[in-house]
Image (spheres, rainbow, N blue to C red):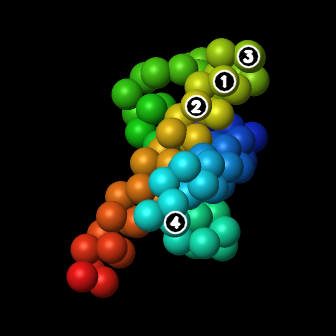
Amino acid sequence: MDIVSLIIQLASGAAGGNIAGALLKQFNLGPVGNSIVGILGGGLGGQLLGMLGVGGTAAGGLDIASILSSIAGGGVGGGALMAIIGVIRNMIRK
């Protein structure tokens, strides 16, 4: 895992968290909350995909497949973690 892939995962995680917050208004954490949780989820999602061996190359190259894998893993991870945290926050409020 190289630093460029990690940066791509973090940025797409922030975007994924904000997109999920816009789509799931009942779980929205606000723009800053969505971004922070999305960044964390993007890093975790991308690392999880890397550990599973999905996407990327063994040398950590920047081919199109590894870039798309980093974007997808980060975006999905960021959106998923934002939704999970939103559900937990709503359960605590009740």
Instruction: Give me the C-alpha separation between circle 2 and circle 1.
Output: 6 Å
- Callout 1: helix, strand or loop? helix
Nearest the eye: 77 or 27: 27
| 91 over 42 or under it: above or below | below
Q: Residues within 10 Å of mark 3 (few under 14, many from 20)?
A: few
Residue 25 seen in this snapshot: yes
Kind of element beneath mark 2: helix
Is disc 3 in contact with disc 1, using a CB cutoff of under 8 Å?
yes
Disc 2 vs disc 1: Cβ atoms closer than 8 Å? yes
Which mark identifies residue 68? 1
Question: Residue 91 appears in which quarter of the rendering?
Answer: bottom left
- Mark 2: amino acid: Ala
Task: Give the labeled residue for mark 4.
Answer: 28
> Which of the labelled discs sits on residue 72, or is there none?
2
Q: Earlier in the sequence, mark 4 or mark 3?
A: 4
Please name the residue shown 44% across and 64% down the image. 26
**N-terminal label among 2 and 3:** 3
Earlier in the chain: of badge 2 and badge 4, it is 4
Residue 71: which quarter of the image?
Answer: top right
User: What is the secondary structure assignment of the residue under circle 3?
Assistant: helix
Q: Earlier in the sequence, mark 4 or mark 1?
A: 4
Please name the residue that numbered disc 3 is placed on: 64
Q: Quadrant of the N terminus?
A: top right
3D distance between C-alphas at marks 4 and 3: 32 Å
Q: Amino acid at mark 1?
A: Leu
Closer to the eye: label 4 or 1 = 4
Marks 2 and 3, Cα distance to the nearest angstrom? 12 Å
* Residue 8 percent coordinates (x, y): 71, 42
